[in-house]
Image (cartoon, grey):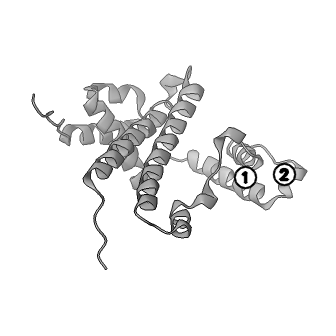
């Protein structure tokens, strides 16, 4: 049984939402840089939640189409992975505080250690803190970050600015990415 491809208008809407989400992700990375110390808390939260909301819109658009075309409700819920959804409106939870404690080298309270999820998240934070003491070695992470920064720099015509706020290794990769990109010509120009 063949499944029809995604309708072109839906495909384009999804591509636009993903593009917007990626731009928000790049801005999250940008606001983590040292020259953004005065605004990093506000802007990383704004852009991270913007990215999450944008990707949620993409998922809900696809889900609405699937529902409209007759997908079984149980299958749709399964594909949406609804059990993984956490609401931001509740704010940071105990396990989030445990994760931060691990990241910044703080111990968990006795009460917090009694919950397995807290212990796991605390240990994850400790591992991440240990890794942060060493230079980034994961080529996939470096490449992803460089692609996001390089794309944004090319679109904003600010390739020279990459060196002013990125670590040298990421700036070199981002510059290389930006140099091979061509800004598309808009129709009718």
Q: Residue furthest left?
A: 188
Compared with 31, 12 (above or below) is: below
> Toward which corner of the image does residue 154 lie, by quadrant?
top left
Closer to the eye: label 1 or 2: 2
Secondary structure of the residue carrying numbered label 1: helix
> Percent from the top left, x then y, of residue 122?
73, 52
Q: Is residue 91 visible?
A: no
Compare residues 39 and 62 and report the one nearer the observer: 62
- Pointer 1 and pointer 2: residues touching (CB < 8 Å)? yes
**Residue at left 64%, top 54%?**
127
Compare residues 6 and 135 and report the one nearer the observer: 6
Badge 1 crowding class, 10 Å Cα cut-off, few under 14, some 14 to 19, many 20 or more, is many
- Measure how far apart labels 1 and 2 are at the Cα level: 10 Å
- Quarter of the image where the C terminus is located: top left
Left or right placement of residue 122 versus residue 78 in this view: right
> Percent from the top left, x then y, of residue 9?
28, 49
Which residue is disc 2 drawn over?
A: 112
Which residue is disc 1 drawn over?
A: 122
Compare residues 187 and 114 and report the one nearer the observer: 187
Badge 2 crowding class, 10 Å Cα cut-off, few under 14, some 14 to 19, many 20 or more, is some
Q: Residue furthest top?
A: 38
């Amino acid at each position: 049984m063949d499944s029809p491809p995604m309708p072109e208008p839906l495909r384009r809407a999804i591509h636009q939402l993903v593009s917007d989400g990626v731009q928000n992700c790049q801005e999250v990375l940008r606001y983590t840089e040292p020259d953004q110390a005065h605004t990093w808390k506000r802007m990383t939260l704004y852009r991270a939640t913007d990215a999450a909301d944008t990707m949620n819109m993409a998922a809900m658009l696809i889900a609405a189409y699937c529902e409209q075309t007759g997908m079984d409700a149980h299958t749709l819920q399964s594909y949406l992975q609804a059990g993984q959804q956490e609401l931001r409106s509740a704010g940071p939870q105990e396990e989030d505080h445990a994760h931060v404690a691990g990241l910044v080298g703080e111990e968990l309270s006795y009460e917090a250690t009694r919950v397995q999820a807290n212990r796991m998240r605390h240990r994850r934070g400790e591992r991440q803190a240990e890794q942060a003491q060493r230079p980034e070695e994961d080529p996939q992470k470096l490449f992803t970050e460089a692609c996001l920064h390089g794309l944004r720099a090319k679109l904003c015509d600010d390739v020279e600015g990459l060196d002013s706020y990125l670590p040298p290794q990421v700036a070199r990769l981002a510059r290389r990415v930006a140099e091979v990109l061509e800004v598309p010509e808009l129709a009718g120009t």
